[in-house]
Image (cartoon, grey):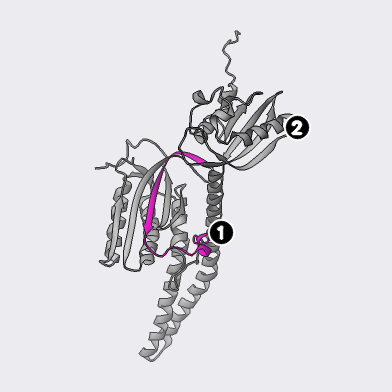
Amino acid sequence: MPVSSADTTPTLAEVFDTLAGGVVLIDAHDRIELVNASAERLLHTTRTQLDGRGLSNVLRNADTLKALCQRVKGDRVALALRNFQVHPVGNTMPTVHVDVVASPYGKDRVLLEIQDTEMKLQIDKENRLIEQRGIGRTMARQLAHEIKNPLGGLRGAAQLLAKKLDQPGLTDYTDVIIRESDRLVNLVNTMLGPTGPTQHRFTNIHRVLQHVKRLLVAESSSDVRIVEDYDPSLPLVSIDADRVIQALLNVARNALQAIDGNGTVTLRTRAISGFTIAEQRHALVLRIDISDTGPGIDDALRDQLFFPLVTSRPDGTGLGLAVAQELVSQHGGLIDITGSAPTTFSLYLPYLRRDAEHGESTS
């Protein structure tokens, strides 16, 4: 059987392009021999412009990297450089902070592996939020088991007692027990949130937000402004609309409470390409921002807000944000606090499919 002469083995450049981190290969004369796509993004340029150029012609602060490369070549060991600031020559883009690992490659070459520290910090933060969500779900289930069983017995006993009471006025007390038992059961059910599979349909997110806005207007005073800042070009997104509405309402009501009847709540939509959620890269993600002009969130609470029963208000249950996080997570998304002045909660929902030909009309 004849063997094809075509070589399907991927080239070194093709292998490097599959890596999420930046990779730069430096030759014996401190010139750039090869870069991957991630390194192009970090350096805000193209491999065509980088190929064959010396480090000093690419970075204004190249001396630190050149010294690192010389040490790696001389000692033949891998060395790390933490929090290096990337200052490209002739580029006005914001400074990027990166971690660099330099390893010997071949006889006189050095392989630089570059990781955006801000992205790493974001991934770490998202992992903490996901961990909180898991802890919160476990807490909710345990509380539901511990609370609902005795409440059922309490309610049943109150009903039996009411039937045996001779004086009608005494049943007022048993009615209070029954009502409060039902209220606590409803509270526990709220903590657990909706169960069962999500019912995804392609949906115009702005229709969802308009519904949320109408509810917020009905609940707020005339001194509250609810501002829209929508991107009209957004494609349809595959979501369970009822659950997303509930998540948005929970967050938006939090914003209304923060401004205490006087201020502005802004609803904003944007699309983000090449976005990572919990270490999974998505081609396109929908971001919904809910901002308020309230006094902000205490730093001591920021990292705990998505735990159940954590609240800054004396009359709060601490369930709204925890349930919202769970509802968004059912869509493979995440809620994060992305701003402090004004306070901004961002809901990230991945576009599961890029096309929306079978979705509902955007008209």
Q: In the rendered image of this protein, does residue 318 appear above or below residue 3?
A: below
Tell me where residue 264 appears, x and y as whole percent. 32, 60
Quadrant in which the C terminus is drawn? top left
Which image quadrant for residue 247? bottom left
With 164 as the anchor, is 211 left or right in this view?
A: left
Q: Amino acid at mark 2?
A: Asp
Residue appearing at x 32%, y 35% in the figure: 357
Residue appearing at x 62%, y 34% in the figure: 63
In this view of the protein, can residue 195 be seen by the observer? no
Q: How many marks?
A: 2
Quadrant in which the N terminus is drawn? top right
Pointer 1 local density, CA inside 10 Å: few below 14, some 14–19, many at least 20:
some
Residue appearing at x 64%, y 32% in the figure: 66
Tell me where residue 311 appears, x and y as whole percent. 47, 67
Tell me where residue 330 appears, x and y as whole percent. 46, 50
Q: Tell me the magenta residue range.
A: 280-307
In whole angstroms, how far apart are the C-alphas of marks 2 and 1? 47 Å
Q: Amino acid at mark 1?
A: Ile
Residue at the limit of the structure toward the top, as seen here: 2
Q: In the rendered image of this protein, does residue 304 appear above or below residue 29?
A: below
Q: Dot 1 lies on which element?
A: helix
The verdict on residue 139 being magenta is: no
- Which residue is at the front of the view, 331 or 164? 331
The verdict on residue 286 being magenta is: yes
Residue at the limit of the structure toward the right, as seen here: 75
Tell me where residue 136 appears, x and y as whole percent. 53, 60
Residue tagged 2:
75
Residue tagged 1:
135
With 223 as the anchor, is 175 left or right in this view?
A: right
Which image quadrant for residue 234? top left
Pointer 2 local density, CA inside 10 Å: few below 14, some 14–19, many at least 20:
few
